[in-house]
Image (tube, rainbow, N blue to C red):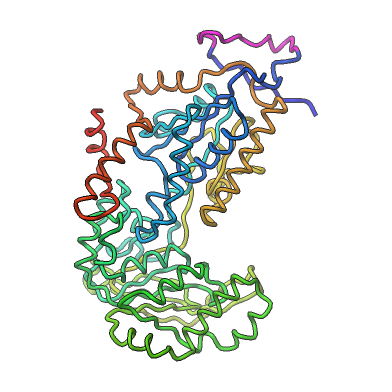
Amino acid sequence: MALRCWRWWHWSAWPGFRPPPSRSTPTPGFCRQLSTQETPQICVVGSGPAGFYTAQHLLKHHTQAHVDIYEKQIVPFGLVRFGVAPDHPEVKNVINTFTQTARSDRCSFWGNVVVGRDVSVPELQEAYHAVVLSYGAEDHQTLGIPGEELPGVVSARAFVGWYNGLPENQELAPDLSCDTAVILGQGNVALDVARILLTPPEHLEKTDITQSALGVLRQSQVKTVWIVGRRGPLQVAFTIKELREMIHLPGTRPILDPSDFLGLQDRIKDVPRPRKRLTELLLRTATEKPGVEETARQALASRTWGLRFLRSPLQVLPTPDGRRVAGIRLAVTRLEGVGESTRAVPTEDAEDLPCGLVLSSVGYKSRPIDPSVPFDPKLGVIPNVEGRVVNVPGLYCSGWVKRGPTGVITTTMTDSFLTSQMLLQDLKAGLLPSGPRPGYTAIQALLSSRGVRPVSFSDWERLDAEEVSRGQGTGKPREKLVDPREMLRLLGH
């Protein structure tokens, strides 16, 4: 197979850069493998798990490679910082690994740079031998039903960003003055949101939840949370760890209808073990009488939560004055198909569920980053084959923007390592441009001319120290900075 040579970009002004031979008289070597003395300049867009795992693998498996990580937020770590629940600090330990990667003398972090606005993907491609897009899924799937725009309807993604200190969600100010909240979706994010809504605030005081969110949760009047799914108990997307936490959540008791689980015992014999264990826990919780200790605990519970199955949202119902949410109309569904392909099909029956808050947790969604990058709006991913972006040599993707918003952090790690392997294979095969590339030197000049001041990893470590210091006074691991202007001011920008 003939190798496709890259087009000639205009970095001839850079010291030590040798222009390639004329295309009219191609000579062997322009698309040759980089020599062991040359430094592959690689850039990664996004500093969440996908970005850092990609960088980590590249640095480990190529001893000369230099990796620059660009991030639109001022601070690194993506959903590890802004998505993982504050009461799951053990999941955030992966930040220690990412920090070691960022401190490598062959890796640089550049925050406060919005790729697609401050610098384009083609400009990155000019400056680097390869570009990896790992910017995740920063949007949410809409419900597409009447009433979705009413005050009191909130995306779970925005709610999670609000209590985790994501700057763009700090104006959310959710109204928790109602008695009942409905969460649409039955994944781990839905259970995270339910747990944060129902956890006694004093149990969150020693976490890294933002002080403002904690203040709102202290005033919350929410006593009941319904977690609604289109399909049945065998198709829930949450995992057993999150379910067990909900079942034993202090001050709460579960409401599960035993009729939802009829005949399920026989149907789970042949399902995979994780699904079987999860369903058995649901079955026991729904159908078995709790022990003396658990009965006593539940008797004292002031808050409740429940799972509603085979229900699909039809319409958000307004109050008589049309100014707020009063409830949600749900279509009763039935299941068609078997196994993982089981679909929920609406019937003609419907029911209304009164509530004052609707949280939509039906999935995250990636956005296109740059007109030059192919994007599949239906699937919400960049079209790719094993991480190689289709029809764009030298452009790669990893994480959720590659495969869709599914899986946990370890899934993303495996996925990112695979993309890195493909990139290194292409490098070894001579499929990437030869000769030096200027890397960050060129991008820095562009950003400077556009008035953009990137934030380095050492800058982040100063902000990190400030957050930890602020948290010490109240016994928290940190008090997150949530105002970008304050962050930049602290850095002297």
Q: Residue 324 placed where, x, y %? A: 25, 68
Residue 460 vertical position relative to residue 146 in the rendered view, above or below: above
Q: Residue 403 placed where, x, y %? A: 58, 50
Residue name at image x 47 percent, y 85 percent: 286
Q: Nearer the viewer, residue 327 or 284?
A: 284
Residue 287 vertical position relative to residue 364 in the rendered view, above or below: below
Residue 400 vertical position relative to residue 59 in the rendered view, above or below: below
Q: Nearer the viewer, residue 125 or 423?
A: 423
Q: Residue 407 placed where, x, y %? A: 54, 57
Looking at the rendering, the stretch of residues picked out in magenta corresponds to 12-27
Give residue 313's quadrant in the image.
Answer: bottom left
Q: How many marks?
A: 0
- Main secondary structure of the magenta stretch: loop
Residue name at image x 30 percent, y 75 percent: 180
| 294 to the left or right of 7 | left
In the picture, the quarter occupied by the N terminus is top right
Q: Residue 219 placed where, x, y %? A: 19, 67
Give residue 3's quadrant in the image.
Answer: top right
Residue 429 vertical position relative to residue 328 in the rendered view, above or below: above
